[in-house]
Amino acid sequence: MALVAGAPGALAQGNESVDGQTYVVGTDTTFAPFEFRKDGKLTGIDMDLLNTIAKDQGFNVEIRSLGFSAALQALSSNQVDGVIAGMSITDERKEIYDFSEPYFESGIQMAVDRDDEAVKGYEDLKGKTVVAKTGSEGETYAKSIANEYGFKVKSLDQSATMYESVKAGSAVAVFDDYPVLAYGIAQNNGLKTVTDKVPGGSYGFAVNKGENTALLAAFNDGLAELKANGEYDKILNTYLADPSEAVPSNFFDLVAKSLPALMTGLGNTLLVTAISFAVAMMLGLAFGFMKISGNIVVRGISTSFVNIFRGTPLLLWAFMFYFGLPQLTGWDVSIWVAGVLTLSLNSAAYIAEIVRGGIQSVDPGQLEASRSLGLGYGKSMQKVVVPQAFKMMTPSLINQLIIMLKDSSLLLAIGFGELLYQGQQIYAANFRVTETLIIVGFIYFVAIMALTKLANFADRRFNK
Amino acid sequence: MSTVSEKTTTSKIQVKDLRKSFGSNEVLQGINLDVAEGEVVCVIGPSGSGKSTLLRCLNKLEEITAGKVVVDGFDVTDPKVDINEVRRHVGMVFQHFNLFPHMSVAENIMLAPVELKKMNRTEARAKAEELLTRVGLSDKANARPASLSGGQKQRVAIARALAMSPGIMLFDEATSALDPEMVGEVLQVIKELADSGMTMVLVTHEMGFAREVGDRVVFMDGGVVCEEGKPEELFGNPQQERTRDFLSKVL
């Protein structure tokens, strides 16, 4: 242990030593048991290994929980020094990164419902359906033996939902990475493994090729040290231990533990909805007025806008703005910008129609009366037509606001940290899908009821 | 009528060969009309004869297809004319009142003077109360239009049209939407206005009233002025077959 505080020492040794240095390391958001949030704190095998090695080798780490792809991008652009994220060592990746010694030997295993006595091996799967994770080694393996044993493979994109589907009976078995399965079982996810592990990839810590050699060497030294002194096995056992040792907490413990993260999610949901609705109102008003314009070009622009955004799925635009736009333009599009663009443009299309309908529902005699007094078109709209139209539009606008709040949950697909996303993060770590969803649903319900009451109160107050 | 230009100084309204089409349907087929200062002209005629359209062309609520309309010295047909300025000189009262339901009675009347920066709110409020007294509704200043009867609404509408102190008033079938027992109170207000020397054009179905207040009656049919003259002449001794035919049906 060389916890030398002296800065000169670290400086003098430069690249040669990691002693006292601070390294920024990127990781995935949730890949239990390697990294996941427990009671709001990032934990897991990767985290424990890295922290123990850092302590052993005398350097400091600063963790950035970025998501798998984002962590790799951050590494490529030198925003982080290394990545540890349950990443398999592949030949392809070796061309751009330098890997540590493998710190974990993974593999594929099959699991069934804990009470299932019928399926004991692949030969019992004939005519049945199994689930595997989209694009994973488990999926590749399951498909490679599907014909031989006569079963069908259905692909899902999350471990937690795969386990739920086995418990719900829509699939008899799941093929997943053995540590992930083992951890789930340790968390009492209601499954049991029935086959031996099929050897798969091994995981490594990565740095950019040719860079941070001292860090990589220190990681390898530390890993060897941990394996030798038994720390390594201790860490693994913490996460992959026998299920009998796990004591399930009750529902209210789950509520108490998940509430801080869910409240953060609710805050993001409300904030992105508020900003998006404000933008959508401005755009919707503009396009709504353009729709009743006498100018055919102006009207055409507005109609095209409405048709495009009403005629395409919200989710598609979320992907377009977050993934497509940066590639097409080279701009750095933040997730907030992408989220607000997605929600506000979609909603603006509907609001434009609400505005148009509201204005057209005002008796034309109102505009004539105002114009006959010598007020201009704009003034007449502002003082006479729009106030009356707005009164008629209010219920529809409140409706639109509530739809937007619920639609904001779709932004989880691009990793926006809203309420349902936080719920997913929680059940990805504890596998209590149904209970977590009940809590999330309840929070949405309460938030929307409160919002509805507030909006109706404002409506009565200002639209007498 | 070759003397149109000479009359510019005395005429409040001059209409010269006015034509108006809705699509291929020509509703006004060449109207000529002069209204002198202080004159009250009543326009009568069957439905679809174009009398309301003629009235609405006078303040350009309808686009004018062809011809010339000069109102209070402004050439309404000139594309460069500030139509909002013209309309401040011309009050208009509609069949269906068209009061602004989201404003009180006083606010309805105050809207134009305040928004057009002719008065501040205090002055406008005083003006509104003065006008409401004039139409016999001084106690309704803070009422909402919805709480008024049809006759009261139309009297408020008249007060509102007078708020900018116009030199000309246009009435578009002002009593047609009223229950019979309310017609009298509105006609009374219009009559007082006529007696005060206001230049007025009224489209009306009230023949008795036209006879009583009109300095001149214009009978329109099929988009043209069929016959015009003093009320006693037109009602007492109509010259045209169509006029006689119409009057025999309505009188």
Image (cartoon, rainbow, N blue to C red):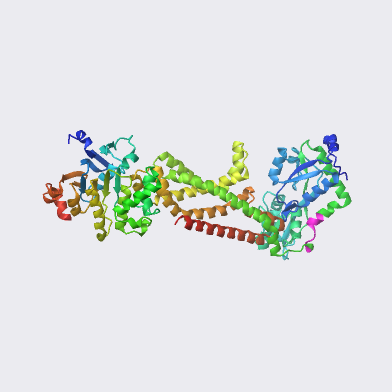
Most foreground residue, B53 or A454: A454
Eyeballing the image, is A67 above or below A122?
above
A272 vs A384, nearest the viewer: A384
- Side of A203 relative to A330 (left or right): right
Residue at 42% over, 46% down:
A382
Location of the C terminus of chain B by quadrant is bottom left
Tell me: A276 left or right of B182.
right
Which x, y percent locates residue B241?
12, 48
What's the magenta region? Answer: A236-244
Query: Which quadrant is home to the N terminus of chain B?
Result: top left
Q: Nearer the viewer, residue B128 or A321?
A: B128
Q: Is residue A283 left or right of residue A233?
A: left
Q: Is-magenta flag for residue A172?
A: no
**Residue A117: where, in percent of width, then height?**
73, 66
Q: Is residue A306 visible?
A: yes
What secondary structure predominates along the stretch shown in magenta? helix
Image x and y of residue B82, in percent: 34, 37
Q: Position of residue A385 (x, y in %)?
A: 40, 49
Residue A238: say if magenta.
Answer: yes
Placement of B69 over or under B122, stated as above or below: above
